Image (spheres, rainbow, N blue to C red):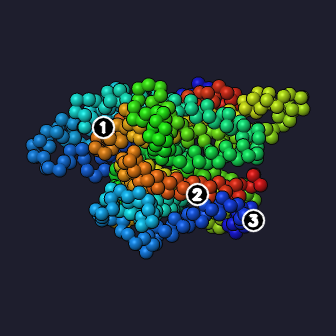
Amino acid sequence: MASFLIKRLIHGIVVLWVVATLTFILLRLAPGGPFDTERKLPPEVLANIQAKYHLDEPLWSQYLRYLGGIVHADLGPSYKYLDRAVSRIIADTLPTSALLGLLALIFALGVSFPAGLIAASFRNSWIDRLSLLAATLGISVPHFILGALLIWLFALQLGWLQAGRWDDAASMILPTMTLGAAPAAYLAALLRSTVIETLGEDFIRTARAKGLRESTVLFKHALRNSLVPLLTVMGPLVAILLTGSFVVEYVFAIPGMGRFFITAVTDRDYPMIMGVTLVYTALLVAANFLVDLCYSYIDPRIRAYG
Amino acid sequence: MTTSLNRIRSTRAHDPLLLCSLFFLLAVAACGFLAPWISPYSAAGFEEQQILEPPSWTHWLGTDSLGRDLLTRILYGARVSIAVGIGTAMIALVIGTVYGLVSGFAGGSLDNFMMRIVDIFYGLPDMLIFILLSLLFGRTVSGLLVALGLVSWVRFARMARGQVLQAKEFLFVEGARAMGASRRRTVLRHILPNILGPIIVTLTFSIPAAILAESTLSFIGLGINDPYSAWGTSWGSLAQDGWRAMRTYPHLIFFPAAAIFLTILAFNTLGNALRDALDPKLN
């Protein structure tokens, strides 16, 4: 098992290095730069700026400087916010994004478990069709449309909640629902199909033949055995949450990392773009590592042969 | 191929949801293509007499802040969405399927190495790679097409490789190889036709994913917004315009949002139906 985890850890580090390198190359190739202004800068000023940010050095030296910085958690200066380092901005905004992501994950799990179980146990009934329809709708609706709809309904028409704030619990309801809807739909559909598959297994027939109550069969036997496939999708799910987070943060004006990322792309603030990309990747790698840990804990075969 | 089509026809021809989706998508594509002939208005320009009108008989979906007919702009926007959706899927299909076929058929360490690369891309959030690539390729329809194609090919690669590994075990493939068929012939004549079903399903799901990605990018202000080009303005950009005025003029966001949502929903419904029809396990 230890060798399995070490292998995964090395894999994660390789992923980070590949992403760091590709982003570095990509952004050096991209046309236009952060210092392209409407008015042409005098050459001396431009040279000074380039010297300050080490842009006058050869590419490989910039690359090594960049990689060396990452090891020390230093992601360089922001081109846009002159007095703040990228690491500083990320440290300030990451907790907000993490809270939003966590709330959305809890929301998704809280909705999908009852919905998936009910749909599976009343298979092909109207309630099953209804939840399947809801799942298709939830997967199809883009974050920005759902967010706009919720704001229009609950903030503008009904006046129950306010949009564009991020301070108390009430202000977090709408963003959480917006970000959590797609994962909830995805998980519910997945849970439904795995539970239905599990309910067809022999050990379920045995359990029923023993005269166990249907609820015991469902929760103790079927649900437990359906959890492993759910765990497999947790990695991609974190990716969905991360992707959604910058749209949701944009729509609800939440001061998180994603909104800074969008601004950084508009401003071509390259160190900021690279920094956020790396943090996203690191989060994903960490999430996948956690999933692997849980996996090897649940499934003894992986512990033995991994 | 023909058996797959027959299976789809026999099991799903009566499904009203599938038929509705299909007709809706055909209508969207036709309207986008025929936009200049359908609409009496222009998608560009400035009409100061009719700014921000609510829906009426002259302007069915109202007008925007420059007096442009919203329905006309949405019709032109369909061009962007359909082109980006189908174009991306085609690029991804070609790159991904060839990659997957080569990797799966080669096997061994080459397969291992090629799939490692796919794994890295597969794990990263699509939107993140998409935004980074769009910086490189520019904010035009063709630029976004290439960027999105480079994002979504991994799905095809994984699927194609998995199918090849399965197909390699089929007796008729073994038979063909035993009879001395070349590698090229085995792949093109025996394996490829047999994995067409899953390819079609993946294709159907990658179109709405591309439309979603493009409209999201346009909504956050990083996408296509050029009313003077033949492409018109993306639905996502229209929704962003509407978003700024949602409090007073909700129709400006409602109709573009509905167009995006219904199109994505129709493609997903189509994909679900195709998957159910082509998955022998479910029949």
Q: Earlier in the sequence, mark 3 or mark 2?
A: 3
Q: Mark 1 and 3 residues: CB-CB less than 8 Å, in contact?
A: no
The quadrant of the image that shows the N terminus of chain B is bottom right
Q: Position of residue B7 (x, y in %)?
A: 73, 63
Mark 2 packing: few (<14 Cα in 10 Å), some, or many (20+)?
many
Chain letter of the residue beneath label 1 in the structure image? A
Q: Label 1 belongs to which residue? A: A271
Q: Nearer the viewer, residue A193 or A9?
A: A193
Residue B10 is marked as 3
- Identify the amino acid type marked 1: Pro
At 22% from the left edge and 29% from the top edge, which residue is drawn? A83
Query: In the rendered view, does A167 fall on the left or right side of A4?
Result: left
Q: Mark 3 and 2 residues: CB-CB less than 8 Å, in contact?
A: no
At 58% from the left edge and 50% from the top edge, which residue is drawn? B158
Q: Position of residue A212 (x, y in %)?
A: 86, 28
Q: Is residue A285 visible?
A: no
Q: Do the residues marked 3 and 2 share a common chain?
A: yes
Q: Is residue A154 above or below residue B199?
A: above
Q: Nearer the viewer, residue A61 or A34?
A: A34
Residue B266 is marked as 2
Query: In the rendered view, does A85 fall on the left or right side of A4?
Result: left
